[in-house]
Amino acid sequence: MANNHNHDHGCGDYLSRRNVLAASGGLFAWSFVPKFAHAAQGRDPRFVTIILRGAMDGLSAVAPVGDPDYVALRESIALSTTGDNPAFPLDGFFALHPAMPQFARLYKAGQAMVVHAVATPYRSRSHFDGQDCLESGYEKIIANIDSGWLNRALQALPKGEHVTSAPGIGIGSTTPLILRGPSPVLGWAPPALPKAGPDLSGRVLDLYAHRDRDLYDALAAGLKVDAISSKAGMDDQLKARGNDIEQMKIAAIGAARLLATQDGPRIAALSFNGWDTHANEGGASGRLAQLLGGLDNALLAFEQGMKPVWKDTTILVVTEFGRTAKVNGTVGTDHGTATVAFLVGGAVKGGRIHADWPGLKTANLFEDRDLAPTTDLRSVFKGVLADQWGLSNTVLSERVFPGSTGSPPLRGLIV
Amino acid sequence: MTNAASQKADLGQIATRRFGLGARPGELRMVASDPRGYVVKQLSNPKSALLIDPELPSSDIIFRNQRKNQDLIKRGRDTEARSMTPSSSIPFLGQTKSTIEGTANTTALNSMLNSDSPMQSAVRSSNEKPKAQKQYQELIYETEAAARFARWASTDTPFLERLVAFWMNHFSVSIGKNGFVTAATGAFEREAIRPHILGNFETMVLAVEQHPVMLIYLDNNLSVGPNSRGGIKGARGLNENLAREVLELHTLGVDGGYTQADVTALARALTGWVYADPANDDVFGGKFRFAPNRHEPGDVTILGKTYPDGEKEQGEAALRDFARHRATAHHIATKLARAFVSDHPPATLVSRLQTAFLKSGGDLAVVTRVLVEAPEAWGAPNNKILSPFEFVASSVRAADVPPDPRPLLNALNALGGALWKAPSPNGYPIDSATWLAPENIIMRLDVSYEFAHRARIKLAPEDLATSVLGSQISAETHQAMMRAESREQALALLFMSPEFQRR
């Protein structure tokens, strides 16, 4: 092609140009596919990693209602197991956010569990670097990170004779870092043009308010927001437009179908946006509740879409770090450290919470502000890879998570 | 930063944004030592505006293929119809899905991506409705679009692409007209616009008004002189559409001083300007043809000048005069200044452009040079909002959004600037007011979000911002980007920032 800036992605560009696949909601390949082995014990496991971008507030997703300092820290957004819209008690100490009834049901059925007070080694509270650390699986942030731990895990899987499809699939328009690397993976993006959610809309509006009157007026009118209304009023109206919530379900439905296919991928990565709740986070209801409700519906979509293989499925839900223990001046929370991780699926040894609880007294908070981490998130990743995929400790500590010898795999996560 | 350095940096912005398609990372650095020179130098390279591509044939071949395709469909030979490729003049029979050369692995990949595999069924049901295979005209249109997106993404003469877009919009045609126009509009641009952007305006006018795509779009292929042989026999008569738009839009402009009588007279002169039937004619089919049977006999008088009875030279002579007319000079000068510099351009600039146009006899190289060397152009504040095409091109260049045709065509549609589909022969508005409308800004938000997720750029967002906006990045935009919840969100904020949206 004259003047075609051809990137070396192997057959990816060629395929999309030749329109072998349906429109923009296509299945695309990043490279040629390797052979793929049966996993441990003759089972055929599925592993989904969902990344919540923006730092999900773990203290609100699974509230330590039994902790004496909890209510004072969280003031008006504290959850309770009594009254209107009560949280689901999980054990005597923790309660699950009321927006997650599907997770509550799966927890009762032993197919969902929580890991609390968990974090990666990263401590500097920047979204970009935090997400890079989460996805790369590296100890430290380096320049030009070129691969993610899930891709390196794929590389390390024992090769077999059974020739099938590419084992890994990234959901979204580009492959997330967690799946980038030498091992070839597929990609799938939902067909519709996703709409920017209230979080982005609000940030742009804010930017225009300080910089460009005409753009502000136009955007505000477009968002049907009164230009001089208060911030709180604006948020309510912005909520009505947002589509971060629907996108979760759409992505989950698509991914589930692909993962359930006999010849399909076995490992998937998705990310959901909108979790950076600095203002008006809400307690039992509000912005975070909406997001958690969306996540809950996505988990249900996975359960329904993967019925035939649900018993071999593990879904891991993680975020780059948590949020401040104390609510801030705009009824929200700021960047923190430790948070929760969820495991959901028929392969999960669920119905329990793994938490070495450090407490919420100021002296026990990390840097006097954040829930302190007592479990390394990499141990959770390693636990799934070891038990479900048969990867050895050596491989996990040297190739997949280099430098993580000090954080052994958390065992017993998988049935 | 000293004043001189920041001055230069702003000139870099003007060089890449006012007179470009937005900077690719690193382009600002390249431009920094001589921003004006960077733009002027592009003018000495008119050939790089051409678009030669083995997959993109000439308009007459496209017309003939389109006709063949329609015939096949009419006769129910759908499979053959759907296996036509852009440049084929014979439908390929028995061609199956594209196969990829390679190892055994590719067979596995192929079979998985084959439309009958379980994977594809899964994908299809995920996509909700199965998509019909493309017809020839859609296929060509997308191939042309892909070539444009690739060109915008990688060109080293972005100013020339801006000129192409300006003139293509000035001589606007719409693919909505019919299948032939859908198929051949890209060829129209390649043949009638690109070769002439720095040539003589008169030459461009003749190339445009004799191009079969324009003749169809403005219905001249239906126009018949009432006293011509064809007119006397048949029921059809004069169609004034082309003549009106030639005077109102292409040359003199709406205030150019022509009358209705002039329009009708020109319409008579242009009768017989048609194209050869693409059916069953593999030599001339689809090419411009003068049809004497339809041409209105007799002299015509337009704007006080009489053009004697003749064949196509009658109309050609009139067009040449319009191309050099004082009102045309004013019209073009005003449009250039409004499109490139400001919605309310300084009178001095318009006047200088107009004089250059008149004195040079419509030499666009001369006129364009006056534009890019104008102190008004380099001093004007960034008040214009990027048009949809400029916005898409800038995002693609800045963040390495893949130039895949479908998503970018969808984005242009969503932004109200569908490629070659302006709702009227006026073309898309060149003032910013339309793009500032609330519903258009909202769509920019969604498109920014999508682009941010498809961008392949590996630079950290703040480095990218500096790389493409230089010193113009405001503290507020920088802070908003640094506080974004993800890299994608930071990119979306960059695309939506006032510094990115205005030039």
Image: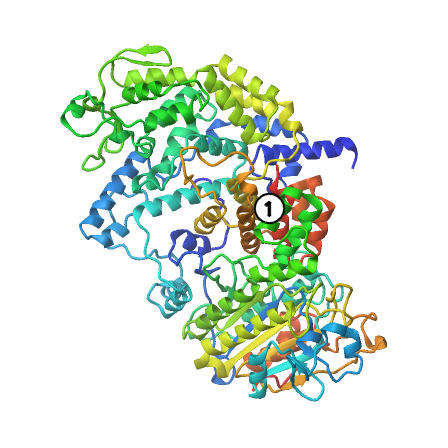
Q: Which image quarter: residue A215?
A: top right
Label 1 Cα crowd, 10 Å radius (few <14 / some 14-19 / many 20+) = many
Q: Position of residue B448 (x, y in %)?
A: 56, 51
Please name the residue shown 48% across and 27% down the image. B46
B196 to the left or right of B140: right
For disc 1, the chain is A
Give SS at disc 1: helix
Please name the residue shown 38% across and 65% down the image. B124
The reply to whether residue B452 is visible in this rendering is yes
Residue that protrudes farthest toward the right in the picture: A363
Q: Nearer the viewer, residue A287 or A310?
A: A287
Q: Nearer the viewer, residue A407 or A415?
A: A415
Residue under numbered circle 1: A218
Total marks shown come to: 1
Query: Is B202 drawn above or below residue A232 in the view shown?
Result: above
Q: Position of residue B426 (x, y in %)?
A: 43, 32
Residue that protrudes farthest toward the left in the picture: B233
B329 to the left or right of B68: right
Q: Position of residue B438 (x, y in %)?
A: 56, 47
Which quadrant would the C terminus of chain A be assigned to in this image?
bottom right
The reply to whether residue B485 is visible in this rendering is no
Which quadrant would the N terminus of chain A be assigned to in this image?
top left
Question: Coloured how?
Answer: rainbow
Q: Amino acid at mark 1?
A: Ala
Q: Nearer the viewer, residue B400 or A333?
A: A333
Q: Position of residue B487 (x, y in %)?
A: 64, 57
Please name the residue shown 62% across and 46% down the image. A217
Q: Which image quarter: residue A150?
A: bottom right
